[in-house]
Amino acid sequence: MSFYTADELKQLRLGSFGERVLISRKASFHNPGNIHIGNHVRIDDFCVLSAGEGGIHIGNYVHIAVYSSVIGAGKIQLADFANISSRVSIYSSNDDYSGEYMSNPMIPSHLTRVDHGPVSIGRHVIVGSGSILLPHVTLEEGVVIGALSLVKNDCHAFGIYGGVPAKRIGERQKHLLKLAATLE
């Protein structure tokens, strides 16, 4: 994987970025001025980050794996130590699928009804491969989302969630908090 140099990162015109940021040259950024990236962050090949008015805010020690997308008008927050596995889709905007309205960004807005809402991913969260997060969702500290899950409701601290829709199926250990303290 080929990563941008620090000088090349400046040319992307991101809102801000920290130290030891590894971004693949094959990642795509839309509205980069609304994207803020902390320290020790890696964003892999074929990821798409498309920031709306709320922006995308990425903390420290975050990994966004290959083919993931972070998209929407609402604020998207990825806190420290978050891990977004491959092919995860995070949406802070979502069309109305009822048939009462039309959908897609090429339709005039008066004919659509798009729901915009924040997505907050807490510290030490892992989102498993192929999962989808919808607007208005908070994943509290330490949450794990199993692969291929659909998250449309909040998930509470140190729970393990999975399924369509995602439900709490277990508890996560907290020893990682001691390990993280060695990095802070």
Image (cartoon, rainbow, N blue to C red):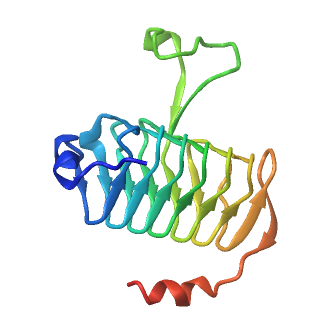
Where is residue 71? Give x, y as percent. 47, 37
Q: Residue at x 78, y 46 (%)?
A: 165
State left or right for residue 130 relative to residue 124.
right
Furthest residue toward front: 1
Answer left or right for 153 relative to 115.
right
Number of on-image labels: 0
Residue under the image location 44 percent in, 9 percent down: 108
Q: Against 171, is 116 above or below?
A: above
Rendered image quadrant of residue 61: bottom left
Counting from the top left corner in percent of width and height, residue 105 is at 47, 16
Q: Name which residue lies at 56% across and 47% down.
A: 136
Q: Nearer the viewer, residue 101 or 132?
A: 132
Q: Position of residue 129 (x, y in %)?
A: 67, 50
- Image quadrant occupied by the C terminus: bottom left
Residue 92, above or below 111: below
Viewer-proximal residue among 39 and 91: 39
- Relative image position of residue 152 (x, y in whole percent): 68, 46
Q: Quadrant of residue 96?
A: top right
Along the line of sight, the residue nearer the viewer: 100 or 105: 105
